[in-house]
Amino acid sequence: MPEDTDDLQWGRSTVDTTCSLDCPDSCSLAVDVDKGQIVTINGSHRHDVTDGFICAKVRRFGDRVYGEDRLHHPGVRQGPKGHGQFKKVTWDFALDLIAQRMREIRDQHGAEAILPFSYGGSNGLVSQDTADAQLFRRFGTARLARTVCAAPTTSVSRAMYGRMPGVSYADYRHARLIVVWGANPSTSGIHLLPHIRAAMEAGAALVVIDPRRTSLAKQADIHLQVRPGTDVAVAMSMHRFLFENGFEDEQFLAANTQGIDRLRERVADWTFNRAATVADVDPALLEQVAEMYAEISPAVIRCGWGLERNRNGGNAALAVLALPAVAGKFGVRGGGFTMSNSGAWRVDTDSVIDAPEPSTRLVNMNRLGRVLTDDTDPPVQMLFVYNCNPATTMPEQNRVLQGLQREDLFTVVFDQVLTDTARWADVVLPATTFLEHYDLKPAYGPISLQLVQPVIEPVGYSRPNLEVFADLAKRLEIEVSPLLQSEPEAVMHVAAALPATVRDSLETSGIATPECPTLPIQFVDVFPRTSDGKIDLFPDALDSEAPAGIYAYQGETAAETYPLVLLSPATSKTITSTLGELRTRLASLEMHPDDADARDLSTDDTVRVFNDLGEIHCPVRLNPDMKRGTVGIPKGLWRKSTMNGSTANALVADSPTDLGGGACFNDARVEVARVVTAELGNRHIALWPTGRATEGVH
Ligand SMILES: Nc1nc2c(c(=O)[nH]1)N[C@H]1C(S)=C(S)[C@@H](COP(=O)(O)OP(=O)(O)OC[C@H]3O[C@@H](n4cnc5c(=O)[nH]c(N)nc54)[C@H](O)[C@@H]3O)O[C@H]1N2
Ligand SMILES: Nc1nc2c(c(=O)[nH]1)N[C@H]1C(S)=C(S)[C@@H](COP(=O)(O)OP(=O)(O)OC[C@H]3O[C@@H](n4cnc5c(=O)[nH]c(N)nc54)[C@H](O)[C@@H]3O)O[C@H]1N2
Ligand SMILES: [Mo]
């Protein structure tokens, strides 16, 4: 509580908390509150990774908290599906209605006809997989495979390294070579940048591997501007070079790995020329990268998620993460790799949930559209969405929307704002934001786990997940542990599932100290958490899972008639679709000037981006930083941000990645053509050659 009398009079205080949005950094925040209202949101110095500095998105998070899209009341649909009109109702009414439908569906079709649908929108260890999991498991609903992000990279890093913690941001300054591979920290994890800069000032070399010339790529010594989906080829040629030139660390490999011989066999054909042709890069530049990697130490690879979102994504991660093992890069500060560090915290979730997972059907979330529109047994009768905005974030947007249209589908959406998904709901429920509830948030870039606590009262009638699921469970006579019914108790309960030392520091300071050092040296402080403690360079289970085996490259098929690859990377404006409501301008398609020339397009022309799955109408922007043959549009756009209400996922197929059942977001093949538009009031009418008119309202 504030002590200064002036402060008391004005009710002004600064509250410490943690950003729980889905970003690697999980910043510590200092929020100024006046008379119960958020005034400013700043980075705090409590956590040394944040060090007082946060992104512009979160600084303006108050615009979301108090914005016009915020949900204040539970609501029941009024009018046709998708129109987003709701009659205000009480929580009792809304939850009774949902409970009644859940019972009816269970009686008629079985509880597996209910599909809870959630991802980690802004959720830590309390607001997800606690009371919700107890309720749905005990009720026997369908289960969800949360594959939309990090599925390939996680399955690979688990199989190879048992999710061994990676090099922390601060140790990048000790590296002499930094390879940023399929990651864009300038947008998606900004606290890595000062350490990369410090390393470069001390003479380190930087290599960026990305189809786009990102701002970091512009500062790099070498930018390998690969064609999307070809990283496995690039990494395999680097392995081959290491083996052929005696750069493999035989001693390390013999003592700490298994499967090296089989890896060696698979790299044999990957000459620089072959890989460079596949990746469409200069073979000499590729060779230079391989030489640098062989010769310079400490060398660290920051592996991102951009490279996993294609048909070769799992194998790309395998081949990249095998490099530091083969080249013997571990054992020194600033050497090794960073993937996700969320595995650093060994939380015993089973003990938190304490309800066995039923053997009900398992739905891969990337196939939501298909699951809602195909004949399944039983058909999905209820979709319960929370912590997620699938109408814009899942593949095959048109199929998802077609599913949401079904009159016989009862859709519940529990969210903070009236998202594109919430517009299709039969019942909407208002959720608190991380500034209004408790949570525990593990970062996945740095190794940090911090307390999230409310800085203001819930806005309107919004409620936290935990309470709502416990309340609904009660109405269904499903038991939810008393410890998972109120947030502060749940925080303690979840903390109890952490190792004792971790829990103690969390309780005293709100910041947990991990069991391993926060700046671990791989193979000095942390080791593979595989069953035999070794790196598995050839996981057999993955070899049988991948359609062409592991370390294989699947090229394009003859059936792919569309010439351009569509990427949908993260932008600094949103976290996936979170905050997308605040975008006021139409989004543009980014295209290389040569590709634009070939289609006679100039900046601000309206184009149609299309393939057999759908089409997006939007302005085009010529951008020489795109790779030729590759176009890009931001991920997480709301439907209002394009002219026809279709976003990147209207063009993304729901075919799985080679490993882990992930989404191929960066693997869409499209064509782009000019569209003639007319503007009528606030409507854009796109008149395309056939005379077919598509309209969008914004
Ligand atoms: N501001 C902001 N921050 C975010 C997010 C956000 O939406 N906005 N999202 C958060 C989430 S959910 C995640 S998972 C992380 C993602 O973090 P990142 O992995 O850094 O983000 P992406 O933008 O998906 O991809 C990174 C880069 O990969 C490139 N890329 C695309 N395809 C390929 C390929 O085939 N090979 C290679 N080598 N590169 C490729 C893209 O051009 C992009 O520059 O960021 C988190 N942080
Ligand atoms: N085309 C394309 N699509 C992509 C990607 C891509 O690269 N390209 N990236 C993918 C990636 S990396 C990810 S992680 C997914 C993310 O996809 P989603 O999981 O759908 O993430 P968000 O769009 O951020 O939506 C999260 C929603 O949860 C709500 N929410 C937040 N906190 C709470 C809470 O405490 N309670 C409740 N009830 N609701 C809450 C937010 O308001 C928000 O609407 O998107 C994927 N989609
Ligand atoms: Mo993600």
Image (cartoon, grey):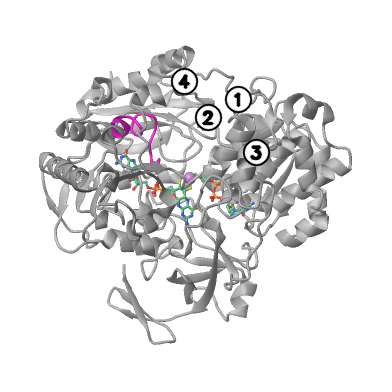
Q: Is residue 426 magenta?
A: no
Q: Quadrant of the N terminus?
A: top left
Secondary structure beneath dot 4 equals loop
On the image, the x and y values in percent for residue 687 come to: 39, 83
Q: Residue 284: which quarter of the image? A: bottom right
Secondary structure beneath dot 2 equals helix
Q: Is residue 385 left or right of residue 218?
A: left
Instruction: List the residue tagged with mark 1.
Output: 529
Q: Is residue 609 visible?
A: yes
Q: Is residue 411 above or below residue 671?
A: above
Secondary structure beneath dot 1 equals loop
Q: What is the spatial separation of the Cα atoms under label 4 and label 2, in whole angstroms? A: 14 Å
Q: Please report whichever mark, 1 or 2, sits nearer to the chain's N-terminal start.
A: 2
Q: Is residue 131 left or right of residue 621?
A: left
Secondary structure beneath dot 3 equals helix
Instruction: List the residue tagged with mark 3.
Output: 540
Query: Magenta segment range?
Result: 120-134
Instruction: List the residue tagged with mark 4.
Output: 512
Q: Name the front one of labels 3 and 2.
A: 3
Q: Is residue 138 above or below residue 375?
A: above
On the image, the x and y values in percent for residue 84 come to: 22, 59
Q: Amino acid at mark 3?
A: Asp
Q: Residue furthest right?
A: 245
Q: Residue at x 85, y 37 (%)?
A: 247
On the image, the x and y values in percent for residue 161 come to: 63, 31
Q: Quadrant of the C terminus?
A: bottom left
Q: Pointer 3 and pointer 2: residues touching (CB < 8 Å)?
A: no
